Image (cartoon, rainbow, N blue to C red):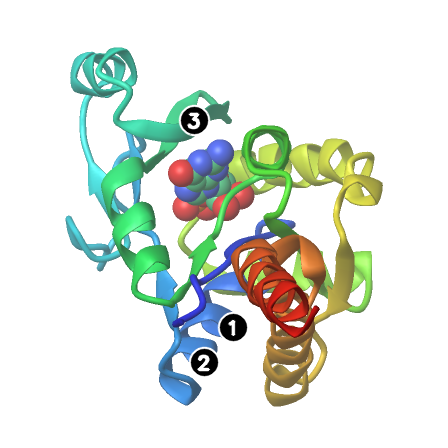
Amino acid sequence: MEQKGILMVLSGFSGAGKGTLVKGLIQKYDNYALSISMTTRAPREGERHGVEYFFTDKQHFEDTIKQDGLIEYASYCGNYYGTPRAYVEEQMAVGRNVILEIELQGALKIKEKFPESLLIFVTPPSAEELKRRLEKRGTESPEVIAQRLARAVEESEGIEAYDYIVVNDDLEVCIEEIHRLVDAARRAPVRRKEFISEIREELQGFAKGAK
Ligand code: 5GP
């Protein structure tokens, strides 16, 4: 029987390099799929609808919540962000590990709703490096950078809720580390429940037959 994919959350401070990591994972291995979130935030330069996000307005976002179309959502720096349900379910069913690149509040909701999800927190090697990366990105105003640094302080309080923390110093090394964690997580009995009950039933059948 084909194993279902796992639901994995990748969080980390804004500027930790999550986007690049996810791209790398998907390019290197074919059993990952990235969930595209819905947001009310305005697109940054170069961002396309349906690629980085599904950009929408508050009204449509709230309608989608009411229709139970999101598996989680949160408000972050004044905007809504949420994970559409359908894609996640389809991809897991065909064996792909679905990556949710979401922040702390969303991660906690996912763990509560799906206890067998895997929560990974990505961080740059130091706070100084984080600040440097945010400034280098050049897409955000100094006010937004300050807001994101303040949010990073809050998020740092939540790191212990994650299953693993990985340091994104060398991109390739970090991609491999994440892949190994996911690979190991797929072998945990909590994520092999169907396989275990199947083998147990078969064994019971043989044991009875041998009596
Ligand atoms: P950004 O505006 O930089 O694209 O994203 C801001 C934060 O929102 C990031 O920490 C990102 O991971 C998070 N985020 C993106 N999509 C979602 C989502 O669907 N749900 C939640 N809870 N957070 C999200």
Relative height, residue 54 to residue 27 (above, below): above
Q: Which element carries disc 1, helix, strand or loop?
A: helix
Inspect the image, locate mark 2, and give the three-letter code of the amino acid beneath it. Gly
Residue 13 visible to the viewer:
yes
- Residue 45, by quadrant, is bottom left
The reply to whether the C-beta atoms of the residues labelled 2 and 1 are less than 8 Å apart is: yes
Q: Nearer the viewer, residue 209 or 10?
A: 209
Q: CA distance from mark 2 to mark 3?
A: 25 Å
- Residue 142, by quadrant, is top right
Question: Where does label 1 land, which residue?
Answer: 21
For the point 56% across and 37% down, which residue is it?
Answer: 114
Inspect the image, locate mark 1, and give the three-letter code of the amino acid beneath it. Leu
Relative height, residue 94 to residue 149 (above, below): below
Q: CA distance from mark 2 to mark 1?
A: 5 Å
- Measured as percent of width and height from the top left, residue 17 is found at 56, 66
Along the horizontal axis of the image, is 88 left or right of 151? left
Question: Where does label 3 land, which residue?
Answer: 73
Q: Earlier in the sequence, mark 2 or mark 3?
A: 2
Q: CA distance from mark 3 to mark 1?
A: 22 Å
- Residue 93, by quadrant, is bottom left
Q: Nearer the viewer, residue 77 or 186?
A: 186
- Measured as percent of width and height from the top left, residue 117 is found at 59, 48
Q: Nearer the viewer, residue 150 or 56?
A: 56
